[in-house]
Structures are given as C-alpha cells and as structure tokens.
Image (cartoon, rainbow, N blue to C red):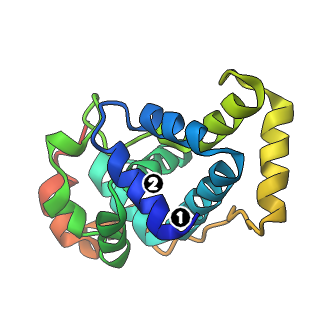
C-alpha cells in the first residue's frame, strides 16, 4: 500500500460516524498484506508525530495531556487526513484555527482511541474471525511489522516546561489556555 492509498482510506473513513469501524471493514476486505502495509504506515505516522512540540500543543488544547491522551490525540490527528496532519506537524498553532465541535469526539476532545487499533482489529478479524484481544495475534502483528522495518519510537525529550507553553504557543494559548477543551 502506498501512502496515497493510505490517506485515501483515511479520507473515505471520515465520512462515517465511526471512523475506526469503517476502516476495519474496508481493511478486512482488502486482505492481510494490505492491512500490514496500512498498519506500518499508521505506526510510522504515530512515530513521526511523537514530538515534544506537538505534545506541548496538545497539553495547551486539553489543559494537560497524559501519555495515553497524547496517543489518542495523535490517532485523531492522523484521522483528520493528510492535509491537516501535515499542516499541524508543520505548525501546531494551526490547531487553533482548525478545531471546532464538528471534529472533536463526543466528550469534546481531539482524540480517537479506536483508530489506534483499527489495523490490529482488521488483522485479528482476518486471522481469527473476531476482534477480541489475542496475545498471539498481537505478537504476530508486531513481529510482521518488525520484519517490515518498523522502529518504535519510545523516548521523547521535552524541550518545554508547563510555564513555557503560553510563550511557545501564543495563538493556541489565546484560544485554549484559560478554557481548554473538554
């Protein structure tokens, strides 16, 4: 699967109420190799977006941002499509202009936890006929991605303190600093 096809699937999935479910359905239909390619590209984007600067922007938006919340935020960001993803990666302050209630989750956050497991769920569905957690299937997927060259990014060095965020993100701070989402 080329990146162009990956982003086409993401865009198409945005038309549905449950983006992750629609992706799982499509991925299951196109086959195991395509699911692996999709998951590899998804994880590469998760790695690329695992930056101190983006985490700082998410912290401002939500008035704090745990490890898990940052994962869900990056899932949401990928789910917004290629153009928005690239724009935010270039300049996280673009989020101040972009975010509105139409592109937030039901609780009012820029998060999409379900999207994080769409590839795994599709892989699992093809291999076992269901999406219930299976340690062996997970290990099999991780091993396949490893063979494809995925290098998980696990460490991040913050280049900001909470007190720095107002100066680092003045546009985001003006919109969300005193009244974060949620």
* Placement of 158 over or under 137, stated as above or below: below
Camera-side residue of 146 and 36: 36
Camera-side residue of 140 and 9: 9
> Can residue 1 be seen?
yes
> Can residue 78 be seen?
no
Question: Residue, x 34% and y 59% (percent of image)?
Answer: 81
Q: CA distance from mark 2 to mark 1?
A: 9 Å
Residue 12 drawn at (x, y percent): 34, 48
Q: Which residue is mark 1?
A: 45
Q: Is residue 19 left or right of residue 102?
A: right
- Within 10 Å of disc 2 (Cα), the crowding (few <14, some 14-19, many 20+) is many
Determine whether the residue tagged by mark 1 lies in a helix, strand or loop. helix
* Placement of 117 over or under 143, stated as above or below: above
Which of marks 1 and 2 precedes in the sequence?
A: 1
Question: Residue, x 55% and y 69% (percent of image)?
Answer: 2
Mark 2 or 1, closer to the camera: 1
Q: Which residue is mark 2?
A: 74
Question: Residue, x 78% and y 65% (percent of image)?
Answer: 148
Which quarter of the figure has residue 44? bottom right
């Amino acid at each position: 699967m080329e990146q162009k096809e990956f982003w086409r699937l993401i865009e198409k999935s945005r038309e549905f109420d449950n983006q992750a479910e629609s992706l799982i359905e499509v991925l299951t239909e196109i086959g195991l190799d395509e699911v692996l390619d999709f998951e590899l590209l998804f994880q590469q984007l998760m790695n690329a977006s695992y930056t101190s600067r983006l985490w700082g922007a998410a912290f401002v938006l939500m008035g704090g941002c745990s490890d898990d919340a940052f994962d869900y935020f990056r899932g949401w960001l990928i789910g917004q499509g290629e153009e928005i993803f690239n724009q935010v990666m270039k300049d996280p302050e673009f989020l101040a202009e972009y975010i509105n209630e139409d592109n937030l989750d039901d609780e009012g956050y820029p998060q999409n936890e379900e999207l994080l497991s769409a590839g795994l769920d599709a892989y699992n569905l093809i291999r076992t006929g269901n999406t219930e957690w299976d340690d062996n299937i997970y290990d099999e997927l991780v091993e396949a991605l490893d063979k494809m060259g995925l290098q998980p990014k696990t460490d991040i060095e913050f280049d900001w303190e909470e007190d720095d965020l107002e100066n680092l993100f003045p546009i985001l701070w003006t919109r969300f600093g005193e009244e974060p989402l949620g």
